Image (cartoon, rainbow, N blue to C red):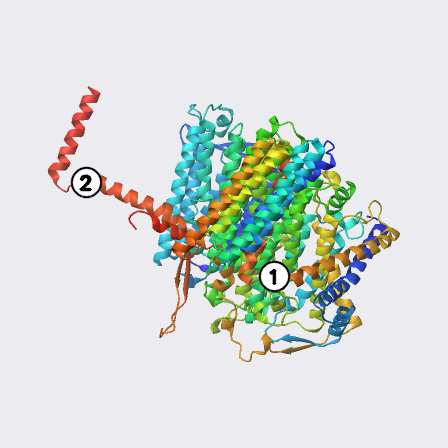
Amino acid sequence: MARPRNLFYVGRVLFSAGALVGLLLAAVALVGMNQVPHTAVLPLGLPDLPFHLRLDALSAFFLLLLGAAAAGISIFSAGYFRASDGAAPGLLCLQYHTFLAAMAFVLIADDAFVFMIAWETMALASFFLVTTDHRLPEIRRAGFLYLLIAHIGALSILLCFGVLQGGNGDYTFGSMRSASLRGAWPSIAFLLALAGFGAKAGLLPLHVWLPEAHPAAPSPVSALMSGVMLKTAIYGLLRVTFDLLQGQLWWWGAIALVLGLVTALFGVLFATVQTDMKRLLAYSSIENIGIIVAGIGLAILFKTYGKTLLAAIALTAALYHSLNHAFFKSLLFLATGSVLHATKERSLGKLGGLIHRMPWVAWLALIGTLAIAGLPPLNGFVSEWLLLQAFLFTPSLPQSFINMLVPLAAAALVLAVALAAYVMVKFYGVVFLGRPREPNLAYARDAGRLERVALVWLAAGCVLLGLFPVQVIALLDAVNVLLIGATVYRPEAGWWLLAPIAADRASYSPAIVLVVTVVVLLLTIQVVHRLYHGRLRRGPAWDCGFPSQTSRMQDTAEGFGQPIRQIFEQFFRIERVLPTPFDAEPRYYVKAEDHFWYWLYLPIARAVDWAARRVGAIQQGRISIYLMYSFLTLLALLYFVG
Amino acid sequence: MTHVPLWAQLINVLAALLLLLAFAMLAQRRVLTLINLFAAQGFALACSTAIVAWATGQAHLYGSAALTLLLKVILLPWLLHRLIRRLDVRWDIEGLLNIPTTMLIGIVLVVFAFNLASPIEQLASTITRSTLGIAMASVMLAFLMMITRRKAIPQVIGFLAMENGLFFAATSATYGMPMVVELGIALDVLVGMLILGVFFFQIREQFDSLDLKHLEKLKEGE
Amino acid sequence: MNASGFLSQLLQLGIALLLAPLLVGWVNQCRAWLQNKSAPPLLLPYRTIRKLFLKDAVVAATASPMFRIAPYVVFAAMALAAAIVPSLATDLPFGRAADAIALVGLFALARVFLALAAMDLGTAFGTMGARREMFVGFLAEPALLMVLFTASLISGSTLLPTIVDTLAQRDLAIYPSLAFAGVAFTMVSLAENARIPVDNPATHLELTMIHEAMVLEYSARHLALIEWAAALKLFNYSCIGLALFLPFGIARGSADAAAILGATPVLIAKLALGGLALALIETLSAKMRIFRAPEFLGTAFLLGVLGMLVNLLLGS
């Protein structure tokens, strides 16, 4: 039992146990949200530095997110990992559950040591999970990049904690709350936190690891990273900004808002030109994180001007979007996992028509696609609705510069949302609809029973979060009270109507929208079949009478993204190989790359290389030189000590 | 909101129209339509001057309005039409940047102008002082049009549109300026037009085209 | 929500469903008059829809259930939008269920389902139409949202009944920001309803189509529902435009059957004028190349943003 090699045992028993633990965690968090914060001190760690743990509303919310999403992903993993993947199942199970446990500890940490230990464990465990298939060099490279940027971020977070403790030497969060920082120190702490947590969340410009690491990892791991790990970074940012720092400044909010919106637009633009389905979803995660950070920035802005109700609405929108994203992004990544297992293809140019062979996966992925595109009555629409309502309130701010900035910000947000719908139609249409682009797709099999259960769980989450926003907001109010001191939930509006500010200001009822749409739909079907008829014939597709239609005639992924690529050409670094009429084997190849590599990372890499070579001049290779170094050091020490 | 009199509302609408036309000129590709838009902007300007004259009772502004009507709506567009007929310039204009980017920069300039104008607005004492921001924005948009165009005619129209914006700022936001200044500016503009007309012919003779990038050949060492 | 409110809601929805094909017929007639051609009969769209319902449906062998469900979903979304837009009365119960942002969301839902159904068959035209439709939608949806935001900044609410109430109350007040919003809205409606200069509703050249390319494979009752939904979309856009810019004659206060029926002639008159204006615009413009559509819609979007900025500056 200590070294489980039996795949069945590992899969069915251990992962299912993990899923149950996840559900338990979510239930505990749900109960703990409305209670007084519990604290605990564990006598682990160094002699004078025990582990402090604390469960308050903010931790409880993110624990709920972790538990609920991880339950679904664990059930999926129970049925997903197969012997042919080449990874030792026991090792994988250990790494997976270490990853989950580390994330849980990050969320309940109450001092900097526990936080950093759990953070590092999280990074290492996920590194091992990402490089599961370590025989391929590009996966090793992706893992290395991921670990590198994770450590740069961790360094920044460590420095931030160093600033926050304000000279006391006591690194518990409790003492950080009461430390009074003066001058530029709070701003420095905020910027360090933004950089450090932003690196983990995937904000520009430290986002380059995300599109490499998420596709390289196995699909359940990608789902866990995208759905849950990025949210721990959001948790960290919220904890530092609203809880550990006493007051905020308006320009922090402005920076977070602008950075978030730029990240969102960048992510979604790059998603439109991707040809690998997991990279597309990874860039889409960058976009959603950008939206969440923009919401946080707006909350900071409102709070600094004392408009606590509006700050609570913006914060609620950001938290709701985190929860939504955990559900629909995990659902989509798991669906791609099923597709990958069934077809062994990751590239969008080799998929298609899978709705016929894999109906369960296809129809549940449709719910995820509609949710992420922000369509009513699902959950993505609710969080975007809340965020847009928060934007419309900003004319009440006293500073006119921010007033002017906000229509531009709202415009950028709606652009990102509209483009997200475009990207998701491309994703779903190319993978599941149309005709199969490769002949061996005819052998694709639908997902197994456990995988279906997981997909249904996550899809049900999307639907329920979309239909009952009032109840979710009532739950989130505990976090609002903790961080900002205002509540959003209005009990008099009714359980079916979402009216956050005042009922005559704005309201939305997803239940009515769904009910009316379904009623009209069914009524129309019935009326048409009664009054006329329901006769149907099958035939070949019309296609303007073109006789021989092949599957190559439908749009490829590059083709679908071509209009966007053409308009926004300056934002990409495009490499194109076009065939000439004289090629014996014509090839068409388009690659859209990130400018940030060439502007930021390669110059830094070259600078580091240059510095390393200079320092390397010390290494002469002759023993007498090394002995001389030791001798000089000895002399210097004797001089200083004496 | 305090009750705003009808004439001030009309001036606000005409200000919005001015900004709309400035934006439309920025996005316009054909020279013919550009000149017509410029004439429309002059007409809006004349109307707003007349309304200010009626509301504040300054008779000399009627004269300003009439002068604007004569020059900007009738004379200058006619001159420009004749010019482009003789130079045979009707084709599409390609700018330095593409149109959506130009318009985005235009929006940023508008935000900048609005913010610049708001502290000044606190000091002014007229009811229509909020149109100062719009006037500044029109000036900046016209300047942007001058910078991002490659052919010579749109640059001239940009220059004239700048003057439109300044004139609007002077009359509507501050209820008019002395007639002397008014006449002086009008004369400047007319003389400028004449000189530019002669200049264009010389350019065309020299380079056989009105594309201004040919002027770069005059650099030393080329 | 009591029974009489519910009934008047149904009455408005019924009138909208009835009037929508009439609007399409009227626009076609005006266009024919302006182009000096003999016009098709005014009730032709009704006869077309009925004819289509009577036919047998032919569905491609490679179609999935998505293809057959999509027309019903699109129709249901457009019908719900028709129930929300205050075309005849403002005090409707469903008006509280979905505000301006949700209205744009409903249009997006219809667009996404139609695009997915077009991609379902895997034909070249279907995917091309889907790509172009999502592209136009990506630019038009933000522009429409900006226009609605301008209106909601003026009226202090995103609920359509409240917007109409506020705009109808001020007697002959002129809002400069609405001038920008009006131009932007006209451009967006032309693009979204597949009118010249963005798309030609009467074309048979497939390479120039957007909307027609998506519904190429549909026949019989599915096509009838999609045609009706397209007419409803035009009707909804016209009613939104009339509600924002010409809100006179809409029954405010309590909305009972008598008030709704009393407001119908005014609506018909306003729609007739709107249809004539649309036909005029279509006759005077030429269809743009598809590559120019981003500039057209980008201009509309930026005008919408400008409208919001002007509103913040001038306070109206």
Q: Count residues near mark 1 (Cα–Cα under 10 Å), then give few for <14, some for 14-19, many for 20+.
A: many
- Quadrant where the C terminus of chain A sits is top left
Direction left: furthest residue: A624
Relative to A545, residue B21 above or below: above
User: Which of the pair A415/B126 is nearer the observer?
Assistant: B126
In the displayed orientation, state which residue is furthest to the bottom: A547
Q: Pinpoint the chain carrying mark 2.
A: A
> Relative to A130, is B65 above or below?
above
Residue that badge 2 annotates: A617
* Image quadrant assignment for residue A399: top right
Residue A324 appearing in the image: no
Q: Which residue is drawn at 69% across and 50% down?
A: A510
Q: Mark 1 points at which residue?
A: C198
Q: Which chain carries label 1?
A: C
Foreground residue among B93 and A135: B93
Q: Mark 1 belongs to which amino acid?
A: Val
Image location (x, y in percent) of residue C117: 61, 66
- Nearer the observer: mark 1 or 2; the answer is 1
Q: Where is residue A609 in the image (x, y as percent from the top left)?
A: 27, 44
Q: Alpha-carbon neighbours of circle 2 within 10 Å: few (<14), some, or many (≥20)? A: few
Element marked by disc 2? helix
Please provide percent x and percent y for residue C295: 55, 55
Q: What element carries label 1?
A: loop
* Mark 2: amino acid: Ala
Q: Where is residue C54 in the image (x, y as percent from the top left)?
A: 75, 75
Q: How far apart are marks 1 and 2 (CA)?
A: 66 Å
Task: Decide which of A69, A395 is in the foreground and name it.
Answer: A395
Residue nearest the observer in this picture, A393 or A154 = A393
